[in-house]
Image (spheres, rainbow, N blue to C red):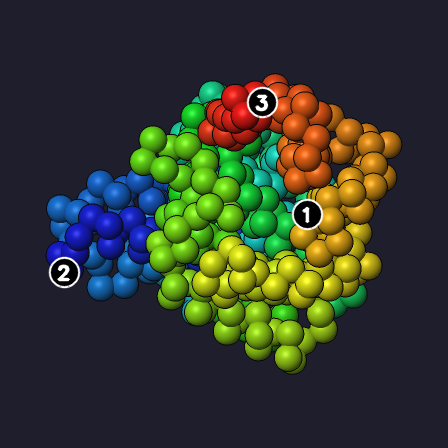
Amino acid sequence: MSAAPASTFEDQLRELAPQVLGALVRRYGHFDACEDAVQEALLAAAVQWPDQGLPQNPRGWLVTVASRRVTDQLRSDYARQRREDTTGALAPRDELEVPDRDDTLTLLFLCCHPALSPASQLALTLRAVGGLTTAQIASAFLVPEATMAQRISRAKQRIKSTGIPFEQPAEDDRADRLGVVLHVLYLIFNEGYTATSGPRLHRTDLTGEAIRLVRMVHRLLPQDGEVAGLLALMLLTDARRPARTRPDGSLVPLEEQDRTRWDQAAIKEGVALVTDALARAPIGPYQLQAAIAAVHDEAPIAADTDWRQILALYDLLERLAPNPMVTLNRAVAVAMVRGPEAALDLLATLDADDRMARHYRLAAVRAHLLEMAGDRAAARAGYQTAARRTTSLPERRYLESRAARLRDAR
């Protein structure tokens, strides 16, 4: 064994967690028992490796330890059910072979199966594929650990009761299932980039994990344009994070950010990814969103932003994948190109949408457009409404400051 820093151990464990779980589930089935066994093996590694050093074959070490745990558990279960004869099919401890294949993508498909609720998909992906503990996931989503434990337990029981097979989906189903996987990773990133509640704007543990997992999928599916597009979108968006808050944690809007603080390496990588994807793959929503982010990131100052190009991209995105959030974001581009009045007319179409009618972002964008149009009283009321509706403390403070500034400017 060789010594290594603690951070190396943690990174290695996160990278290996889905590979080990995939190997066990493929061998034994019983996702719930295998997932528990992997968590125990990860805990054992976290305790032993820093003192004893990194094993020569870390993956094999984890597979062996986890396999012993799951074998013991299954033998115990079979014994209780008086099925001792079945345990003979289990591999003896000293005959275990460590498979070469990486089942991470298959594991992602399992965790994001349509039979699971969206909340369960998020939690199970972070635990089984991301290697996060239940406590870490609960902290990220600001719920008690017991609540998150129940959510994960229900998800595992759902997999067991429905008999979801551990296999790649059929070819005609793969695109839809991959879409669910990417959407789950997209939601994880968004929750980290703008936390829906709590005192902090960012959850870097979640954004970092989402980027890591999409990189993993990109390595497994390097030719998929939407995988590349989502990775590009995350990199181009996260590149602005260093300039997005002040030292006191308050929010800095895009047009006011110090762009010299943006992560230029991430921007370069993101631009290269989306440029390549758009040139060779069928155009998809993540690629278009990444292209929009690239236009923003490549402008040296806010005044140089090519809003006409952004509007054209939003026009295409709305035709390809229409949804209220796309319309809301497109309205800002419309305002920059055609004026706030045209954008306010566009927002009026969202008032009848139940998904958006009481969303704080609709009120916030409308207030911004009203401010652009010179209607300060209506804008101030809109910012106040948006502030009441958001559960993010940094966003609430920012919206309240916008309202106060309009009050003081009278």
Alpha-carbon span between mark 1 and mark 3: 25 Å
Q: Pointers 1 and 3 in contact (CB under 8 A)?
A: no
Instruction: Residue 51 in the image: state x and y as whole percent.
Output: 13, 46
Mark 3 closeness class: few <14, some 14–19, many ≥20 residues within 10 Å: few
Q: Which mark is residue 332?
A: 1
Quadrant in which residue 289 is drawn: bottom right
In screen coordinates, is 319 left or right of 31? right
Can you identify the residue that label 2 sits on? 2
Q: Is residue 49 above or below residue 350?
A: below
The residue lying at 13 percent from left, 56 percent from top is: 3
- Mark 1 or mark 2: which comes first in sequence? 2
- The residue identified by callout 3 is 410
Q: Earlier in the sequence, mark 1 or mark 3?
A: 1
* Residue 150, above or below 43: above
How far apart marks 2 and 3 lie (CA) works out to 68 Å
Q: CA distance from mark 1 to mark 2?
A: 55 Å
Amino acid at dot 1: Val
Quadrant in which the N terminus appears: bottom left
Q: What x and y, as percent, mark residue 253? A: 50, 42
Q: Earlier in the sequence, mark 2 or mark 3?
A: 2
| Kind of residue indicated by mark 3 | Arg
User: Neighbour class for label 2 at 10 Å: few (<14), some, many (≥20)?
Assistant: few
Measuring 34% from the left and 44% from the top, which residue is drawn there? 41
Quick one: 131 or 211, which is closer to the camera? 211
